[in-house]
Image: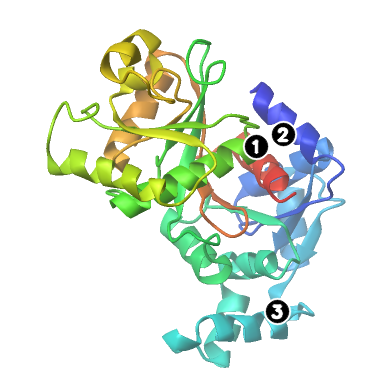
Amino acid sequence: MDLIQSLKEQAKGLGKKIVLPEFEDSRVIEAAAAILKEGFCVPVLVGAEDKIQAAATAAGVSLEGAEIINPATFGELNKMVDTFVELRAKKGMTPEKAHATMTGDALFFGAMLVRLGLADGMVAGSASPTANVLRAAIQVVGTQAGLKTVSSSMLVLTDKKEYGDDGLLIFSDCGVIPNPTSEQLADIAESSVGKARSVAGMKEPRVSFLSFSTKGSASSPEVDKVVAAVEDLKGRNVDFAFDGELQLDASIVPSVAERKAPGSQVAGKANILIFPDLQAANIGYKLVQRFAGATAIGPIIQGLAKPIHDLSRGCSVSDIVDLCAIAAVEAK
């Protein structure tokens, strides 16, 4: 958790504004109050001020210093409506529908604040399904230039210092795409490197595309997909080392890498692991979390043009606070 504290310190003084659109959830109110005490960003709450202040009173906390925006009376509402109509014109969006969305759906309103630069990021999902959060993010903020895929990374910190970067590894995608295509796997790798650099401060990303095969030791459509992802990435002129297909042990254990993938720039020292599908990634990080006592931070959404992050509906107050610190640092 030293990483999270470091992120909070980095965020202090940046003055970033992070939208928390679900004030009806008491955990969000408590998280906003905790953020104000720590002083690493400005929480932006969406809703009627009297209702938000009543929620704060009920939670026994102060929101002094927070920004509260009521969509119904917001001075930039017309601009938000016009922008949404323009974005969704081909989908039949009308001014009436856009107005109803902006005033009636806090997720879309919060995402539009981020798109227009009126806020720097958003953290939501404690009271909303992931699909709703991502729908608002994709329709309003859109994907990062050059990428078509929204995915996620998990920061996994272990006391096994011989693996990854002094015990830090990035697992992707752990929360969004059940069965990614080869092109999506290549996108996930690019996004994961960006996240590793911006959030974890990783200096030398080394990406392994995982499989049950290493360099042709097995053949199947599942392996072919991973091989195709590596070939796709080769055509993108990226600025980081990557290799595949590699088994997990060949990816992180030098002695195994020497036998299975000699000469590889990545094998035996990978710090970013791209899993072939969501089942493998979800099982993998939870095994490491439980058996090795690792700390798993995330899933952290990636691939969007601006930082918007999704929470589990079972999240804690500290989870909300931590994701706000991540979003604030990314926004710089």
Question: Does residue 312 appear in the picture of this structure?
Answer: no
Mark 3 element type? helix
Q: Viewer-proximal residue, 28 or 262?
A: 262
Identify which amino acid the numbered label 2 is placed on.
Leu
Q: CA distance from mark 2 to mark 1?
A: 9 Å
Q: Quadrant of residue 322?
A: top right
Q: CA distance from mark 1 to mark 3?
A: 30 Å
Dot 2 or dot 3: first in sequence order is 2
* The disc label shown at residue 72, or none: 3
Which residue occupies 63% across, 34% down? 318
Question: Mark 2 or mark 1, which is nearer to you?
Answer: 2
Task: Name the quadrant of the N terminus.
Answer: top right
**Could you tell me residue 302's position as x and y percent?**
52, 49
Mark 2 element type? helix
Vertical comparison of 275 with 308: above or below: above
Question: Mark 2 or mark 3, which is nearer to you?
Answer: 2
Task: Say left or right for 190 vs 230.
Answer: right
* The disc label shown at residue 7, or none: 2
Q: Residues within 10 Å of mark 3 (few under 14, many from 20)?
A: some
Mark 1 element type? helix
Dot 2 or dot 1: first in sequence order is 2
Question: Does residue 307 appear in the picture of this structure?
Answer: yes
Query: Disc 1 marks which residue?
Result: 322
* The disc label shown at residue 78, or none: none
Identify which amino acid the numbered label 3 is placed on.
Ala
